[in-house]
Image (cartoon, grey):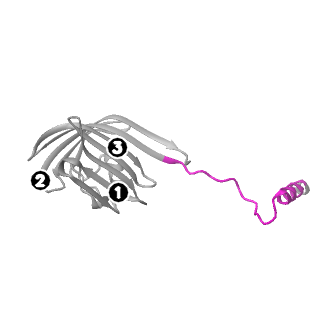
C-alpha cells in the first residue's frame, strides 16, 4: 500500500511544471452580508418625521451602504468600507463629509455607534447607547426605540420597525 501511495505522489509531483510548487486547492472564504429595511419615526426639537431606512452591512470589510428616506426625499446617504473610508451626504444640510473611519461621521437619527460592527450589533442584537428593544422574533429585534441626542446635541426619540431582513452568505468573486 505504501508503495502505491509513493508512486502516486511521485507521479503527481512529476506532472507539475518545473519551478511551480504543488499546492492544495484554494480555499474560499465565505462572507456574510446583512440587508435590512426599516420603517422609522422621529420626534425631536426640530419636529417630527417618518420614512424608511435601508441598510447593507458586510462585517468582514466593514462595508456599509445606508439610505434614510423621509416623505419621498433622501435625507441621508452613507457609503464606504474600512479600506476606502466612508462618505455621508445629508442634502437638507448641504453636508457632504468623508472620513477614514465610520466614527468620524455624524449620523442623524441614530446613536453615535463608532463602527460598522456596532451598527451590526444594533440591528442584530438591539445593543447601543440609549437603545431599547420593544419586540423580538427569531431573527432578532423587530422594534427598537432610541432615546438620546442627535449629532448636534439635540434630544431625539427614534422608532425603528424592521420590515425586511436578509442574511446572505456568499463566496468572493
For marks 1 and 2 on the same chain, the one whose residue lies earlier in the sequence: 1
Q: Which numbered disc, 1 or 2, marks the residue closer to the eye? A: 1
Contact? badges 1 and 3 (CB < 8 Å): no
- The residue under label 2 is 154
Between 71 and 102, the one lying in front of the other is: 71
- The residue under label 1 is 86
Q: Which numbered disc, 1 or 3, marks the residue closer to the eye? A: 1
- The residue under label 3 is 55
- Residue at mark 2 to residue at mark 3: CA–CA distance: 24 Å
Contact? badges 2 and 3 (CB < 8 Å): no
- Label 2, residues with CA under 10 Å away: few <14, some 14-19, many ≥20: few
- Label 1, residues with CA under 10 Å away: few <14, some 14-19, many ≥20: many
Q: Is residue 36 visible?
A: yes
Quick check: 24 above or below 143?
below
For marks 1 and 3 on the same chain, the one whose residue lies earlier in the sequence: 3
Highlighted range, magenta:
4-31
| Residue in the picture at 13% in, 56% down | 153
- Label 3, residues with CA under 10 Å away: few <14, some 14-19, many ≥20: many
Amino acid at each position: 500500500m505504501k508503495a502505491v501511495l509513493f508512486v502516486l505522489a511521485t507521479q503527481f509531483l512529476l506532472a507539475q511544471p518545473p519551478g511551480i510548487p504543488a499546492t492544495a486547492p484554494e480555499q474560499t472564504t465565505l462572507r456574510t452580508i446583512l440587508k435590512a429595511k426599516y420603517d422609522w419615526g422621529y420626534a425631536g426639537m426640530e419636529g417630527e418625521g417618518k420614512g424608511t431606512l435601508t441598510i447593507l452591512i458586510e462585517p468582514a470589510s466593514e462595508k456599509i451602504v445606508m439610505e434614510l428616506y423621509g416623505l419621498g426625499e433622501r435625507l441621508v446617504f452613507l457609503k464606504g468600507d474600512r479600506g476606502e473610508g466612508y462618505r455621508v451626504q445629508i442634502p437638507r444640510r448641504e453636508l457632504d463629509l468623508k472620513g477614514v473611519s465610520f466614527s468620524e461621521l455624524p449620523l442623524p437619527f441614530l446613536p453615535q455607534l463608532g463602527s460598522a460592527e456596532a451598527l451590526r450589533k444594533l440591528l442584530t442584537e438591539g445593543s447601543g447607547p440609549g437603545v431599547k428593544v420593544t419586540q423580538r422574533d427569531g431573527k432578532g429585534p423587530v422594534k427598537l426605540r432610541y432615546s438620546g441626542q442627535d449629532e448636534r446635541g439635540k434630544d431625539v426619540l427614534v422608532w425603528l420597525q424592521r420590515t425586511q431582513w436578509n442574511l446572505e452568505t456568499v463566496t468572493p468573486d
